[in-house]
Structures are given as C-alpha cells and as structure tokens.
Image (cartoon, rainbow, N blue to C red):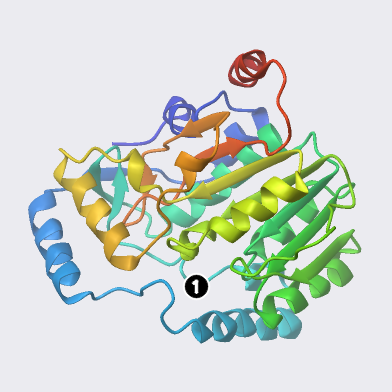
Amino acid sequence: MNLQPNDFARMFGGPLDPKTEAEIGWHSWAYEVVDPDPIVLDLWKRIEHKDFSIVGQNNERWQKGWQENLDEFRRTGDIAALEPKYLRPAKYLRLNSQFIEPENPMFERNWYRVFRGWFARRYLSAFDAIYEFGCGSGHNVAFLAQEFPDKFILGADWTEASVEITHEIGRALGSAVSGEHFDFFNPPTGEWRFPRRNTAVLTIGALEQTGTRWRPFLDFLKRTKPAMCFHIEPCCACYDANNLVDYTAIRIHETRGFQRGFVSEITPLRYHRTGFGSLLLEGYTQLQWSPQEMHGEQARIDELEGAP
C-alpha cells in the first residue's frame, strides 16, 4: 500500500497547498498493514511492567537531551542538528487504528515534516508572532523562522539549553527569534502580556508532559489572551476504546501519565484526529481555540473549515 495526496488531506483535515503536494513527492510512503496480535502482546507486557518513560520522572533528561542538540548545533551550524532524537527510525507505526510496517524507517519523521509545513502555512501564516511553549530542541522554532522570516518567533521552555538554542537560531538565521524561560506549572503572573496583539500560541508534544497539572498553563493563556492557541498533541479522548490497537494506546497514554482533561475546559474551534502516530500512540491530534472573547463563533468555525 502507498499513501496518496488525498490520504494526507484526510489525515491533515484540509486541502493541500502546492508546496505540501511537492514535499509529499520527495519521499516514499509505501507500507504494509501487519498482524496486530504480537505487537499488542508485547505492548501489554510493557504496560504491565511500566516499561516507558513517565511524566515527571527524571526531568533532567530533557536538559541533557537538548544540551546535546545545542552542542551539535554549535559545532556544525547545521539546523538539522536540532532534530530531536525521538524522531528516529521505526519498524512499526500506527495508521487508521492499525499497525503498519513502513518501507522507509524514517516514515514518521518525513510525515511530520510534511505535516508541520502544511499546518504552519494553513493556520499560522496570518499571525504577526508565534510563541511555541515547550520548544525543546528548537527544531520547530528554526523551521518557523525559515518559513516565516518576517514574523517574530519565540521559543519558551523550562530548560536553559532550550532557551540558548533559540538565541543561537536567531543569530544563525538573522531572524527575529528569541527565547524565554517558561515553566508550565509556574507561569508568569501579574500584568504579563504578549507584546504583539496578533499572536498565536503553539505547543507540539509539550502539553502532554503536564499530566493532570495543566491548569496553571490554561489559566495563564486565559489571562494573557493570545489571539489563537494551537496544540498538536496526543489526546486520549480521540481513540475508539472498542478497537484493540486504539485501546492499547489509551492504556499507554494513561500509564505514561500524559495530559488528560484539557480539552474539556475549553471551547475548541477545531479538533481533528490525524489517525497517525508512533508504535506507542498517536501524537498529532490538532486542537485550536481562542482565549479571547469570541463573537459570531459559529460563523468563524464555518469560515475556518471552509477556507481554501
């Protein structure tokens, strides 16, 4: 089997732009659907023994990991050095509630790059500034700075290595890129404001790490009122609990302590499951909402969903 452009449009949840169609053509998307039983059995054994990284355990690994990216970036000057190590070769992935074996072991990394470009052009191009919270290795910050050289891009993270990476990106690209220290559990208080009114907030695989402690971040967003918030994250609620492959992801999500309950506290303008992910779970569910007062909300939703 082979993914086609119409499959990407369905997964992404919208029509493809010409650049995305061209990028799809750069890679092989061949795969085979595989028997889920041995994979599920192995995963359930891992669930039983909690053989996964758990939210809140050994947080220093993030500082260590991002420091390695920073050191490599300084040594080579190559933006590719910022790619996080978790985008690694994989034998099995998830697609449409099935397990698949891709022909190209870097299938997920290539898929993510295509998806990220499509998402940025479709949803972030209208904003003057983009703030990525939990920016980690800075690979998304670097991409956004290259894709939108006229915008202000800020990466925020609790690790010093991440903040320094954003400064290095700005120096390397000559772009309006900056970084700030930010703790999801202890965000700024008082009269803190986004310096640009038309600001988009973005998290990609970062909100997941808040577990059940996302309330301070949500309150921060509601208080500071960026124009729009976008989250690309694992979402436990999107799975079909009657499907064995999906149910395994639910249990892994719970075992790892990933974020749950956030979506029930907001009014989503868009909530879309891509149906694609790693061996363990789907990491690319799209959530969009605005902390600002909304007028004519249904008209705005219709406009978003029907926009070319």
Identity of the amino acid at label 1?
Answer: Lys
* Horizontal arrangement in the rendering, residue 197 relative to residue 43 (left or right): right
The vertical placement of 98 against 62, above or below, is: above
The quarter of the displayed image where residue 108 is located: bottom left
Residue 35 visible somewhere in the drawing: yes
> Where is the N terminus found, in terms of image quarters?
top left
The quarter of the displayed image where residue 10 is located: top left
Q: Nearer the viewer, residue 32 or 148?
A: 148
Q: Position of residue 102 (x, y in %)?
A: 31, 51
Q: Position of residue 235 (x, y in %)?
A: 40, 47
Secondary element under disc 1, as helix, strand or loop, is loop
The quarter of the displayed image where residue 122 is located: top right
Residue 77 visible somewhere in the drawing: no
**Residue in the picture at 71% in, 78% down:** 73
Q: Which residue is mark 1?
A: 85
Q: Position of residue 244 (x, y in %)?
A: 14, 45
Q: Nearer the viewer, residue 221 or 57?
A: 221
Identify the residue at the far front of this view.
190
* Horizontal arrangement in the rendering, residue 7 relative to residue 226 (left or right): left
**Residue in the picture at 31% in, 58% down:** 253
Q: Position of residue 119 (x, y in %)?
A: 62, 39
The vertical placement of 170 against 242, above or below, is: below
* Horizontal arrangement in the rendering, residue 96 relative to residue 70 (left or right): left
**Residue in the picture at 66% in, 83% down:** 72
**Residue in the picture at 84% in, 52% down:** 194
Q: Residues within 10 Å of mark 1 (few under 14, many from 20)?
A: few
